[in-house]
Image (spheres, rainbow, N blue to C red):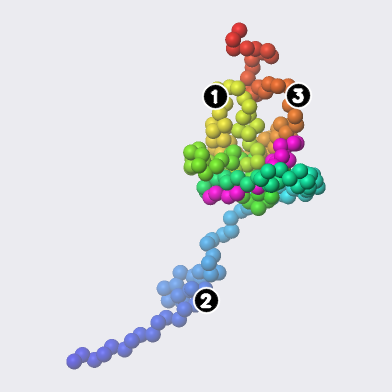
């Protein structure tokens, strides 16, 4: 019979998963580390800073509106709950006040921006059953309170479709574009002075009619 060979002891394990000097590729760093930290997203920083400021400014008005609605006791309650598709296709519930006066329903969604479910500027928030919500490009960004499609939804031009505007924004968005959209959003919230609304690219003379 051949002699039994002695069992070699395992090499000592170094700190944080290191295999020791022999054959070691160096210390592996802190446990669970996945490399250097990613830089903060400028768009998310804008949402967090400006969204928090706007929410603080709008809080008294929203509180007063909620109290007024509670006194009236509207059917279904003072809060509207709607299921929408968010970042990476995950659904979430949007809560907004049941009112359109001064677009307080829009301002009441600011907590979703602060929490990270929505963005100040982004593609329109669509319901999960909407076929357009499954577009891969749409799921790469958080849906926005406002955006190019929301601002131009009343345009009468046949090519000026919300879907194309949303896709163009997703593919070309940057902080400067977000600030420009936000600057155009405030006048859009005010009551319109005229019945019509023309797109920026519509150069037809005032009073033009296709039947003439």
Label 3 element class: loop
Within 10 Å of the Cα at label 2, are there few (<14), some (14-19), or many (20+) other Cα atoms? few
Identify the mark nearer the N-term, 2 or 3: 2
The residue mark sitting in front, 2 or 3, is 3
Q: In the rendering, at what x and y percent does residue 10 appear? A: 40, 82
Label 1 element class: loop
Q: Distance between the residues labelled 1 and 3?
A: 25 Å
Q: In which quarter of the image is residue 58?
A: top right
- The residue drawn where x is 70% and y is 34% is 185
Tell me: residue 55, above or below residue 1: above
The residue mark sitting in front, 1 or 2, is 1
The residue mark sitting in front, 1 or 3, is 3
Please say if the residues under marks 1 and 2 sit with CB atoms less than 8 Å apart. Answer: no
Q: In which quarter of the image is residue 82?
A: top right
Which of 8 and 98 lies nearest the eye of the viewer? Answer: 98
Region of the chain picked out in magenta, as a range: 90-106
Which of 130 and 1 lies nearest the eye of the viewer? Answer: 130
Within 10 Å of the Cα at label 1, are there few (<14), some (14-19), or many (20+) other Cα atoms? few
Based on the picture, tell me whether residue 100 belongs to the magenta stretch. Answer: yes
- Provide the residue designation for mark 3: 193
Can I make out residue 42 in this image?
A: no
Q: How far apart are marks 1 and 2 (CA)?
A: 62 Å
Q: In the rendering, at what x and y percent does residue 107 appear? A: 72, 43
- Provide the residue designation for mark 2: 15
Which of 154 and 9 lies nearest the eye of the viewer? Answer: 154
């Amino acid at each position: 019979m051949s002699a039994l060979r002695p069992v070699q002891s395992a090499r000592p394990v170094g700190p944080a998963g290191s295999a020791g000097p022999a054959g070691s590729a160096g210390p592996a760093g802190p446990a669970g580390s996945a490399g250097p930290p990613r830089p903060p997203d400028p768009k998310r920083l804008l949402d967090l800073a400006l969204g928090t400021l706007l929410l603080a400014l709008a809080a008294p008005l929203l509180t007063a509106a909620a109290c007024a609605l509670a006194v009236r006791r509207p059917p279904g309650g003072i809060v509207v709950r709607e299921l929408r598709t968010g970042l990476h296709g995950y659904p979430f519930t949007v809560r907004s006040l049941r009112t359109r006066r001064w677009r307080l329903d829009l301002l009441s969604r600011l907590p979703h921006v602060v929490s990270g479910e929505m963005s100040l500027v982004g593609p329109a928030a669509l319901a999960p059953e909407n076929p357009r919500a499954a577009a891969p490009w749409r799921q790469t960004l958080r849906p926005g309170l406002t955006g190019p499609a929301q601002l131009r939804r009343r345009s009468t031009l046949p090519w000026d479709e919300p879907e194309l505007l949303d896709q163009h924004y997703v593919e070309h968005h940057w902080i400067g574009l977000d600030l420009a959209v936000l600057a155009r959003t405030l006048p859009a919230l005010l009551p319109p002075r005229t019945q019509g609304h023309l797109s920026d690219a519509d150069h037809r003379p005032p009073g033009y009619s296709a039947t003439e």
